């Protein structure tokens, strides 16, 4: 369960959430995001854990076990492909955090004015070699942990770093809010401007919620297959969703006030966090010498770990499939997937520089994969997982999983069942269609 929280809390909360909020206009978007997390993401999360624990298998095997001889197994196989695509561009951003950790260790931010930080980031991501090398380092770390196994490798890691990350974000948030000019940023996050809430923004809020909770691509299903029978699925899933939401909100309140204080445009895209954080750290060091530099090191280190615990959950989907279904050894499975993800990741990385002119449906390769995953693959996967649990599995089996065989009373089961069977699939289908039309 700690590993599930590790999968959920990652770059999606710290890097993606603030800039998506900035692109779609602040408070109104956040409200939709919170409602979607409770009423849509939680049922999808539960559906995946139910399938995982019931079948005790990888995504493909799970479908074969619970619905033998049906086309559902192709959903299982499709998730292996989705996770590898997602990992390939996630690893590029993971590489950015490696670079920023190195930069903070070398005290590279100290004294650099905020206008220059934007240029520093732009030059870095558009160069050819450095981001590719960082992506490689990140992916190698990820493969190394996967080889160590889920329990030893992943759990031990997350248990120590998650609380540290939490404390650091709270400290940074407190400081950011105290900066002159930050009030505008706080207002931006608290005062909804409903006129900015387009259908596209609603769809993006739901996409972000799925992304943040690692839904629709079989990651939670795979981890669910390792969860013990005695564990309370509802309590742990709700706990994971709550902490993930909290991390995202804290990151928003740490970054957005500083964005306004630094005079950066909130809608400036994927670089937002990397351009804003050094500004905060510099200001801190201005107030207390070296304080910002030290917090920067700790912060980028914990971001890196949060990114790694998410990335390994993506890799684990493919590794579990290849080991259980194709009988490959863990090292061979990891190696095969590494090569695939590494190659696509390089293209994603170059799409900020030498390949920036190469467009797929008007998007760069990186943007295309990000949109493909969060607007389509995750949404479609989430839809199918809820349909599977609500319509293919029996009510008794679902109740049995949610109560761990009657061990836990679950008075809200009828409401959950209703959400899983009707509300979630219908709403998610509506979002999928909206995305297609848009
Ligand atoms: N939830 C992760 C984050 O917020 O960074 C990203 C992610 C991990 C998405 C695993 C999907 C996934 F399967």
Image: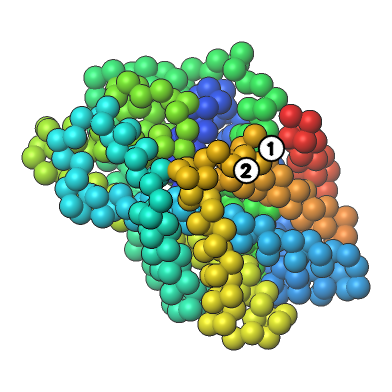
* Marks 1 & 2, CB-CB < 8 Å contact: yes
Q: Is residue 170 above or below residue 331?
A: above
Question: Foreground residue, 12 or 265?
Answer: 265
Q: Is residue 292 above or below residue 149?
A: above
Instruction: Say what secondary structure mark 2 lies in.
Output: helix
Question: Foreground residue, 319 or 342?
Answer: 342
For residue 137, which quarter of the picture? bottom left
Q: Is residue 135 above or below residue 363?
A: below
Q: Which residue is mark 1?
A: 361
Q: Look at the numbered disc 1 and say if its residue's Cβ is closer than 8 Å to ligand 1.
A: no
Give the alpha-carbon distance from disc 1 to disc 2, as whole Å: 8 Å
Query: The C terminus appears in which quarter of the rendering?
Result: top right
User: Which tag, 1 or 2, sits closer to the chain's start?
Assistant: 1
Q: Tell me, yes or no, if residue 327 can be seen here.
A: yes
Question: Foreground residue, 37 or 309?
Answer: 309
Point out the residue furthest to the right here. 69
Please rate how many residues cluster around mark 1, counting C-alpha atoms within 10 Å: few if below 14, some from 14 to 19, many from 20.
few
Please state the horizontal and vertical placement of residue 217, each as a whole percent of the image.
67, 57
Point out the residue furthest to the left here. 289
Question: Foreground residue, 373 or 426?
Answer: 373
Q: Which residue is mark 2?
A: 368
For the point 19% across and 34% down, the residue is: 112
Q: Tell me, yes or no, if residue 306 can be seen here.
A: no
């Amino acid at each position: 369960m700690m590993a599930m929280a590790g999968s959920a809390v990652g770059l999606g909360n710290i890097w993606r959430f603030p800039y998506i909020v900035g692109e779609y206009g602040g408070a109104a978007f956040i409200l939709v995001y919170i409602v979607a997390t409770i009423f849509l993401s939680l049922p999808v999360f539960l559906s995946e854990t139910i399938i995982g624990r019931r079948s005790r298998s990888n995504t493909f095997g799970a479908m074969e076990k619970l619905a033998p001889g049906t086309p559902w197994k192709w959903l299982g196989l499709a998730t292996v492909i989705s996770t590898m695509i997602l990992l390939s561009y996630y690893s590029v951003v993971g590489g950015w955090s490696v670079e920023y950790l190195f930069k903070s260790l070398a005290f590279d931010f100290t004294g650099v004015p905020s206008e220059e930080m934007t240029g520093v980031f732009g030059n870095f991501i558009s160069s050819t070699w450095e981001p590719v090398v960082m992506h490689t380092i990140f992916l190698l770390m990820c493969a190394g942990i996967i080889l160590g196994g889920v329990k030893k490798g992943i759990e031990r890691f997350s248990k120590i770093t998650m609380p540290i990350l939490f404390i650091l974000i709270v400290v940074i948030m407190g400081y950011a809010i105290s900066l002159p000019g930050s009030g505008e940023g706080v207002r931006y996050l608290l005062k909804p401007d409903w006129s900015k809430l387009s259908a596209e923004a609603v769809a993006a809020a739901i996409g972000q919620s799925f992304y943040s909770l690692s839904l629709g691509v079989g990651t939670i299903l795979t981890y669910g297959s390792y969860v013990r029978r005695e564990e309370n699925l509802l309590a742990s899933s709700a706990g994971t969703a709550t902490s993930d939401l909290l991390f995202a909100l804290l990151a928003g309140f740490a970054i957005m006030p500083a964005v306004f204080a630094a005079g950066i445009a909130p809608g400036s895209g994927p670089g937002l966090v990397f351009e804003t954080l050094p500004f905060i750290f510099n200001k801190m060091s201005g107030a207390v010498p070296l304080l910002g530099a030290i917090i920067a090191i700790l912060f980028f280190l914990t971001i890196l770990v949060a990114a790694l615990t998410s990335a390994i959950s993506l890799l684990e989907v493919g590794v579990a499939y290849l080991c259980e279904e194709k009988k490959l050894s863990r090292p061979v499975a990891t190696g095969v997937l590494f090569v695939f993800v590494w190659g696509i990741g390089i293209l994603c990385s170059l799409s900020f520089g030498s390949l920036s002119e190469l467009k797929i449906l008007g998007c760069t390769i990186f943007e295309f994969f990000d949109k493909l995953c969060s607007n389509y693959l995750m949404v479609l996967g989430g839809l199918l997982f809820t349909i599977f649990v609500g319509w293919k599995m029996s009510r008794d089996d679902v109740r049995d999983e949610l109560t761990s065989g009657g061990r836990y009373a679950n008075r809200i089961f009828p409401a959950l069942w209703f959400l899983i069977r009707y509300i979630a699939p219908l709403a998610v289908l509506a979002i999928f269609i909206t995305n297609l039309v848009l």
